[in-house]
Image: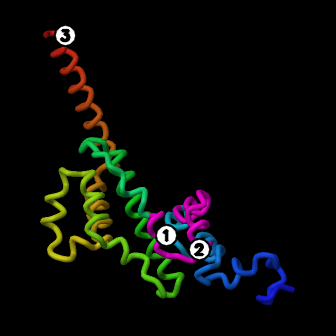
C-alpha cells in the first residue's frame, strides 16, 4: 500500500496523488472539472483546459500563477475585432466569461488558499482585451469609475451586456446584408475607376 494510505494510487508517483485538493496534486483540477455542481459551461471550459494539458502541466509544479497565466493567455491576442463581426464578439465574450469562471472555480475549490482571480485584475489584461474592441473602450470607461475599471469581473459583465444582442437573428441578418451592400459598392467603385 502506498505511503498516502490509498490502495488505488500507484506507489511510484505518490506526490501526484497526495490529496485531491493538495496544490501539487494533478487530480485536484481534474476533480474540479468533473464536479456536477459546477455550471456546465465552467465544467466544459475546465475539461478543455485539462484535455489540452494546460492545467496538468501547471499543477505538476504546484504553481497557481502558471495556471492563471495559461488560462489568460488566450485573451491576449493582438487583433482588432470588427464591430459587425458578431460571431467573433460573442467568442471573445465567452472566452472572457469562461476564463473568469475557471479562475473563480479554482479559487473556491482551493478553499480560498490562493486567489486566482486577483491576478486577472490588472491594467495589462483589461487593456489587452479592450484593445481588441476599440469602439467600446469609451463605453467601458464611462460605465466604471476608478478601480472598478480594473476588475476582471466588471469586464465580463460589460462584454456580456454588449454582446447580448449579437444572438438576435434580425441583427445578424441585417449585419450580413450590410456587409453584402458594402462589398458590392466597393466592386462597383473599383470597376468604375
The residue that appears at 28% across and 73% down in the rendered structure is: 151
Identified at 14% across, 9% down, the residue is 192
Q: Is residue 67 magenta?
A: yes
Does dot 2 land on a helix, a strand or a loop? loop
Report the span colored magenta: 45-71
Which numbered disc flags the more N-terminal residue, 3 or 1?
Answer: 1
- Asked whether residue 88 appears in the rendered view, the answer is yes
Q: Is residue 16 magenta?
A: no
Above or below — where is 84 with respect to 45?
Answer: above
In the rendering, at what x and y percent does residue 116 appear?
43, 77
In 3D space, how far apart are the residues under numbered discs 3 and 2 (Cα atoms)?
Answer: 61 Å
Q: Nearer the observer, disc 3 or disc 2?
A: 2
User: What is the crowding at mark 2: few (fewer than 14 residues within 10 Å), some, or many (at least 20)?
Assistant: some
The answer to whether one can see residue 36 in this image is no
The residue indicated by pointer 2 is 61
Find disc 1 in the rendering and name its residue: 66
Residue drawn where x is 69% and y is 77% of the image: 16
The reply to whether discs 1 and 2 touch (Cβ–Cβ < 8 Å) is yes
Looking at marks 3 and 2 on the same chain, the residue that comes earlier in the sequence is marked by 2
Residue closest to the eye, 98 or 110: 110
39 horizontally vs 177: left or right: right
Query: For mark 3, does the 10 Å Cα neighbourhood hold few (<14), some (14 to 19), or many (20 or more) residues?
Result: few
**Which residue has dot 3 on it?**
191
Quadrant location, the C terminus: top left
Q: Along the line of sight, which residue is nearer the eye, 112 or 68?
A: 68
The secondary structure making up most of the magenta span is helix
On-image quarter of the N terminus: bottom right
Amino acid at each position: 500500500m502506498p505511503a498516502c494510505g490509498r490502495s488505488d494510487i500507484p506507489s511510484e508517483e505518490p506526490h501526484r496523488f497526495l490529496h485531491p485538493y493538495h496544490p501539487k496534486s494533478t487530480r485536484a483540477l481534474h476533480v474540479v472539472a468533473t464536479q456536477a455542481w459546477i455550471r456546465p459551461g465552467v465544467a466544459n471550459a475546465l475539461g478543455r483546459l485539462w484535455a489540452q494539458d494546460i492545467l496538468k502541466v501547471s499543477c505538476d509544479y504546484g504553481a497557481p500563477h502558471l495556471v492563471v497565466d495559461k488560462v489568460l493567455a488566450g485573451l491576449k491576442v493582438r487583433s482588432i475585432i470588427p464591430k459587425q463581426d458578431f460571431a467573433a464578439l460573442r467568442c471573445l465574450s465567452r472566452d472572457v466569461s469562461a476564463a473568469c469562471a475557471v479562475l473563480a472555480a479554482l479559487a473556491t475549490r482551493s478553499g480560498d488558499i490562493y486567489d486566482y482571480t486577483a491576478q486577472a485584475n490588472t491594467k495589462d489584461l483589461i487593456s489587452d482585451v479592450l484593445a481588441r474592441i476599440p469602439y467600446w473602450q469609451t463605453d467601458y470607461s464611462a460605465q466604471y469609475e476608478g478601480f472598478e475599471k480594473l476588475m476582471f469581473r466588471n469586464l465580463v459583465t460589460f462584454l456580456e451586456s454588449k454582446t447580448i444582442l449579437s444572438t438576435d437573428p434580425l441583427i445578424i441578418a441585417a449585419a450580413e446584408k450590410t456587409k453584402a451592400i458594402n462589398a458590392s459598392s466597393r466592386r462597383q467603385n473599383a470597376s468604375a475607376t
